[in-house]
Image (cartoon, rainbow, N blue to C red):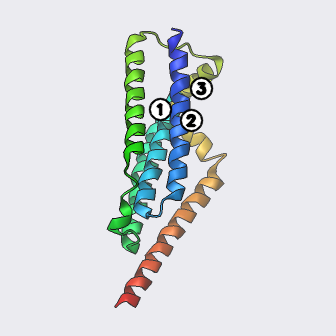
Amino acid sequence: MQNTPLFYTFNFYLFGIIAIVSAIVFVTRKSPVAAALWLVNTMFSLAAMYVMLDAPFIGVIQVLVYAGAIMVVFLFVIMLLNLGHPSEIADIRNQRWRLIAGFVGLAMLAEIFVLTRANSVPDLTLARDAAANSVIESGAVGTVATSLFTTYLLPFEITSVLLLAAIVGAVMIGKQRSANAR
């Protein structure tokens, strides 16, 4: 029972570090395709953190909406604009990255070993109990939808309009490039 909170704390910080490093690598990539794939990695790390914070619905929505649908739209726009060249798609591949990947793989195996050895479930705190009661009363979707469509309605709508404008702008730029290329 004592190993389980340490396990969750370690994983939370591990996925937090992975998300931060992936976001930094995302910003520093020259290839838009490679950058988009690093952004997907960031989204998966954030989804794992949501699941560890006892918000599995938000974690699944993070994967479905952001890592799935929006990234498909981003990759479609990148292909439409023809920004990526095959020589730029590959990231740096050398011995250092292989060692880092091996270390991460060993860390994940150690975590799986610790998880299978610990047969206890962590105790819920008062905040988790309050959140659990809210989810039980109105359901996970109802809890998220209530705050999304009341408190955060304006930021939600502004974000959707900005994404739509970005996609329309990318399509227009793509059409202008193809018209100039002819």
| Quadrant of the rendering where the C terminus is positioned | bottom left
Is label 3 or label 1 in front? 1
Is label 1 or label 2 in front? 1
Q: Earlier in the sequence, mark 2 or mark 3?
A: 3
Residue found at x 65% / y 55%: 154
Return the mark for residue 173.
none
CA separation, marks 1 and 2? 13 Å
CA separation, marks 3 and 1? 12 Å
Q: Is residue 55 visible?
A: no
The residue to which callout 2 is attached is 143
The residue to which callout 1 is attached is 56
Of 84 and 123, the residue lying toward us? 84
Write down the quadrant of residue 133 in the picture.
top right
Element type where label 2 sits in the image? helix
Taking the image as shown, residue 73 lies to the left or right of residue 153, namely left
Element type where label 1 sits in the image? helix
Amino acid type of disc 2? Thr
Of 57 and 92, the residue lying toward us? 92
Q: Is residue 12 visible?
A: yes
Residue found at x 53% / y 69%: 165
Q: Earlier in the sequence, mark 1 or mark 2?
A: 1
Q: Residue 13 location in percent, x, y?
A: 56, 31
- For the residues labelled 3 and 1, say whether their Cβ atoms are less than 8 Å apart: no
Amino acid type of disc 1? Pro
Q: Earlier in the sequence, mark 3 or mark 1?
A: 1
The residue to which callout 3 is attached is 131
Amino acid type of disc 3? Ala
